[in-house]
Image: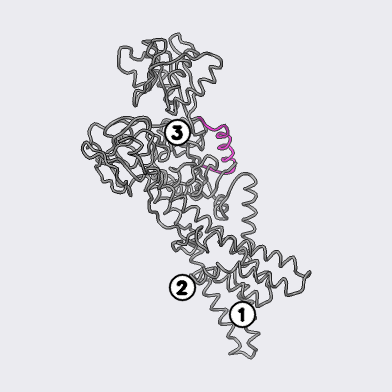
Amino acid sequence: MSPSSMQKGQATGARMDASPIRNRAGRPHQHDHEGMLFGARTELYFALASGAALAIGWLLEGRAPPPTPLLFYGAAYLFGGFFTAREALDNLRHRQFKIDTLMLVAAVGAAFLNAWAEGALLLFLFSLGHALENWAMGRAKRAIEALGHLTPERAMLRRGDAVEDVAVADLKIGDIIMVWPNERLPADGVVVAGASAVNQAPITGESAPVEKQAAASADAYSDFSKAPEQHRVFAGTINGSGALDVRVARLATESTLARIVRMVAEAEAERSPTQKFTDRFERVFVPVVLVLVGALMLAWTVIDEPFAASFYRAMAVLVAASPCALAISVPSAVLSGIARAARGGVLVKGGGPLETLGAVTAIAFDKTGTLTEGKPYLTDVKPLFGATEEELLAVAVAIEHSSDHPLAGAIVRDGAKRLGETPVPRAEAVESITGKGIQGRIDGAVVQIGKPGLFETGPAPMPNELRLMVTNLESSGRTVMVVRRGARYLGVLGVMDTERPAAKETVVRLRRLGIRRVVMLSGDNQRVADAVAGSIGLDQAFGALMPDEKVAAINTLKVESGGVAMIGDGVNDAPALANANVGVAMGAAGSDVALETADVALMA
């Protein structure tokens, strides 16, 4: 059976159930946002139609016969009030009195007072805000569902000497699955055979692939969380050039990726303290106003006045008691602020994040792709023992040119730039040393390039001078590769995901704006995190964090510092973005789920 046929059907991701996103009333938001006749898209069209009818009616005021503006105001009422009326009726069916009910009754009251334009404006702004909220929730829901597609639906299960194509959902703990090169891993597990470099960026955010090798025995590390990094792999990550056999350690519904999906959905459904206060206020305020209005309408039965007088007094109180001014002025102020931010390349998703940003006192940055460029660069070329920089680079570029490893790509790309017109020799018999490096022949001599561990044994171990240089580079966060030609060491190369040019200045300006604490939350190892944080000037760096550990760090920061903003770009950042007081996504570089989960997107 060929690898392609074995992997048939793996292109489609497995779906993972997530908690329902909730609407403003706190109930599960279940209508189809895009597909249904009265979905979020239709709601937005109705709101815009209401605004257009209102504008035409206002322009015709005093310029056309009296019935004409009234017809357009009536159309604005119809389009603007349709979904508000549906929401109000839904609230009443659930024995809830929400602001939708009060806004609708207030608009009707305004019409009875002959204030058609004011009532139409109220319904337009209210329906527009509601439509945009539901549209955003629909996008967030789809982004969360898309996370499940990072995991293949099918897996290759070993049964003795046979291999069977099975559904990932049917895998059980202890099953042995086979993962071909360049395929996504279907389950969390421990490597029991083979070796490969695995791209863990979707889960941990690490900029460089992580070398994986087989554990001592197939039954080792029954507790997956305690398995060493070199042995454990995660569902949704991407295998490198080596085939792996993996013992399943977690069911599909309990994988790290599945937990990310649940954490994001739960955080999206969680209501902020302000929203909770508003809900409690509405539950008391709206019924009180409606009861008061009802009592005033019956005043004619106990005092000597006509029903019309009691009715108009009740309508006046209704309009005065309703938060019409807030419903009109607050959206206007928010829209102005959002528009101003958008002109600067900052997309703010609503008034809530805009308000919360002003109370932020601590900021947590992701590292890869946020503070750094998000891809490796050749940062250090250190020739030794009489070798020149040109010789070291030419040999390295020649050998690494045949590798598909991301670090090899950085050496070839940046090394060729440094060499300029210097000729690169021809490499032959190039082959991977799985998990350690690469080797080939140049002019008959064997050339090896790889991690320092590759050269710890053999006839020509690393000299002390070389060891010292390796230690110094590793302590500064570099990934170090040693180059040896025959028995002669040519030197070392350092590769690193470099910081963005504006990173330092950004941190300085944030401090000037009153941010008291700036930290880094990274999936990279602590050494790399400390090196980047020290270079940029952060207060603290937390390394080797899984997505749920980033959430815990955000919650700790909330307790210690109050308002916390999280800035990130990857799938692994989504739970932390959702749990922070304000989540900020790197727009162009960000993953879809990070952009949809975040409250603010930096698009410029």
Q: Is residue 181 magenta?
A: no
* Image: 228 above or below 110: above
Q: Nearer the viewer, residue 325 or 517?
A: 325
Q: CA distance from mark 2 to mark 1?
A: 25 Å
The label on residue 207 is 3
Q: Quadrant of residue 290?
A: bottom right
Element type where label 1 sits in the image: helix
For the residues bearing labels 3 and 2, Cβ distance under 8 angstroms: no
Q: Which residues are magenta?
A: 498-516
Quarter in which the C terminus is drawn = top right
Q: Position of residue 196 (x, y in %)?
A: 34, 30
In this rendering, the answer to whether 14 lies above or below 275 is: above
Name the spot of residue 511 as percent of width and height, x first. Answer: 56, 40
**Which residue matches tag 2?**
93
Marks 3/2: CA–CA distance: 52 Å
Can I make out residue 298 in this image?
yes
Give the vertical position of 34 relative to 5 (above or below).
below
The residue to which callout 1 is attached is 314
Q: Nearer the viewer, residue 62 or 119?
A: 62
Residue appearing at x 46%, y 49% in the figure = 558
N-terminal-most mark, 1 or 3: 3
